[in-house]
Image (spheres, grey):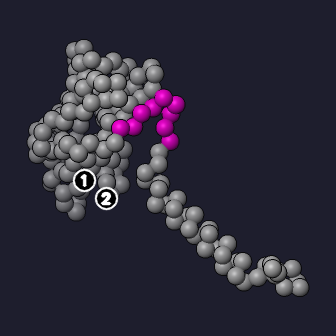
Amino acid sequence: MKMGDKTGKPAKWAVALATLALFALLGAGYFFSGQLRHTAEGEVRLPQSACDLNRKPCRVILPDGTELTAEISPRPIAAMSPLSVRLLWPDGEAREVRLDLVGVEMEMSMNQTRLQETAPGAYLGQTTLPVCVTGPMRWNAEFILVREQGNIIVPFEFSSGM
């Protein structure tokens, strides 16, 4: 099979194929970019919980068998109102517990809250959601348990009202 003409240029089909492959690769990268995240060695990212923090406290069983309960109140969760964040992990041990709140449909400024340990296994913090001018908004809430042997990330999704 001949790759090009006598001038040494590649055939048009080869250029078209290479262009198509490049666009396919870029499209796949874009599609998976939201799903792939760099994780540190030993870090565990749990699947998104089906529990809605806007309706009730949510319980999750971690890979080590311990139970964690996360809660944001008052409910319904509203923007521009003080929110109390509570995490109970009585059989676990973390050097630090953080909550990252990230807008799903709209990129908002970084909203990270460090929770303070108020009793063994009980963590508490305060935060406020920024207002979204388009109305109610969906949020990803990721509780990050910072441990010696690697972080555990526990994700939830909820919607906030105005």
Local secondary structure at mark 1:
strand
User: In front: 27, or 146?
Assistant: 27
Q: Which residue is mark 1?
A: 138
Amino acid bearing label 2:
Glu
Say whether residue 52 is magenta.
no
C-alpha gap between disc 1 and disc 2: 7 Å
Q: Position of residue 8 (x, y in %)?
A: 86, 79
Q: Position of residue 102 (x, y in %)?
A: 33, 47
The magenta stretch spans which residues?
38-46
Is 16 placed left or right of 98 in the picture? right
Give the residue displayed 43% in from the left and 51% down from the top: 35
Q: Residue furthest front?
A: 1
Give the residue displayed 25% in from the left and 14% down from the top: 120
Mark 1 in CB contact with mark 2 (< 8 angstroms): yes
Instruction: Bin the neighbour count of mark 2 within 10 Å (Cα to Cα): few under 14, some 14-19, many 20 and up.
Output: few
- The numbered disc on residue 103 is none
